[in-house]
Amino acid sequence: MLLDRFDGVQTQVLGLSVDSVPCLKAWADSLGGITYPLLSDFYPHGKVAEKYGVLRSEGYSERAIFVIDKAGIIRYVDIHDIDQQPNNDVLFEVLYELEPELAKPYKTADAQSLPEAVGDVIMYCTQWCPGCRRARALFAEYGIQYVEVDITRDRKAAAKVRSWANGNETTPTFNIRGEILVDFNQEKLEKLLGISK
């Protein structure tokens, strides 16, 4: 999640799920750990999700993002399909409205201009992405040199990924000698790298 890197802004990211605490811990461990607290809405089941209007009748919640200001007022709501990646730049705009000076460096228009990545193999990634970890292991196994671009820090690179991934910030996304591969697919990745078994 991008907002856990929103350094300097008085923002607290919380994850909430109707899953139990052991299930949430296993999920976080599978990602290699996360940097924000996870809350369990397991018992009484889904009561918080129900209060926010996102609990489905089947007993699980919609995938949703809420931005709540310091006065407890909901300033932004995004309810989206589980397979859809929200546009984090929209969230930055909301935070910019709440704290303009602190959030200014994270606006797309004001984002730090980073040099464009150059190389035969470029991986656009995030630190928490499981597919990115698998790709790093594959690259290490075959001694493949690659350039890694963290899209949570390089918003221009994030925009590029969205242009390739139907508007989503899907990671990992690869640019291998001009061929784009969205998401981790080991068979396709090995073929593009010329290391098919």
Image (cartoon, grey):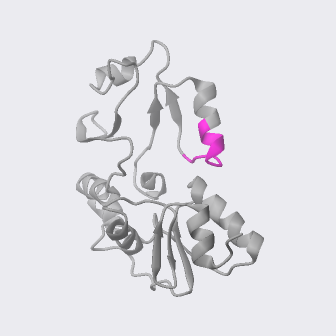
Residue 68 appears anywhere in the view: no
Can you say whether 135 is above or below 122 in the image? above
Query: In the image, is 101 to the left or to the right of 117?
Result: left
Can you say whether 53 is above or below 95 in the image? above
Q: Which residues are magenta?
A: 27-35
Can you say whether 71 is above or below 116 in the image? above
Residue 188 screen position, x and y as percent: 56, 67
The residue lying at 36 percent from left, 24 percent from top is: 49
Query: In the image, is 181 to the left or to the right of 136?
Result: left
Numbered circles on residues, count: 0
The residue lying at 60 percent from left, 53 percent from top is: 130
Identify which residue, 5 or 33, lies in the foreground: 33
Identify which residue, 104 or 65, lies in the foreground: 65
The residue lying at 30 percent from left, 66 percent from top is: 107
Residue 89 screen position, x and y as percent: 31, 60
Residue 83 screen position, x and y as percent: 38, 46
Instruction: State the image quarter where residue 13 is shown.
Output: top left
Q: Is residue 112 magenta?
A: no
Can you say whether 143 is above or below 31 in the image? below
Q: Residue furthest front?
A: 197
Residue 104 screen position, x and y as percent: 31, 66
Instruction: State the image quarter where residue 166 is shown.
Output: bottom left
Instruction: State the image quarter where residue 80 is shown.
Output: top left
Instruction: Classify the position of the C terminus by image quarter.
Output: bottom right
Query: In the image, is 52 to the left or to the right of 140?
Result: left
Identify which residue, 195 or 111, lies in the foreground: 195
Residue 50 appears anywhere in the view: yes
The residue lying at 36 percent from left, 73 percent from top is: 160
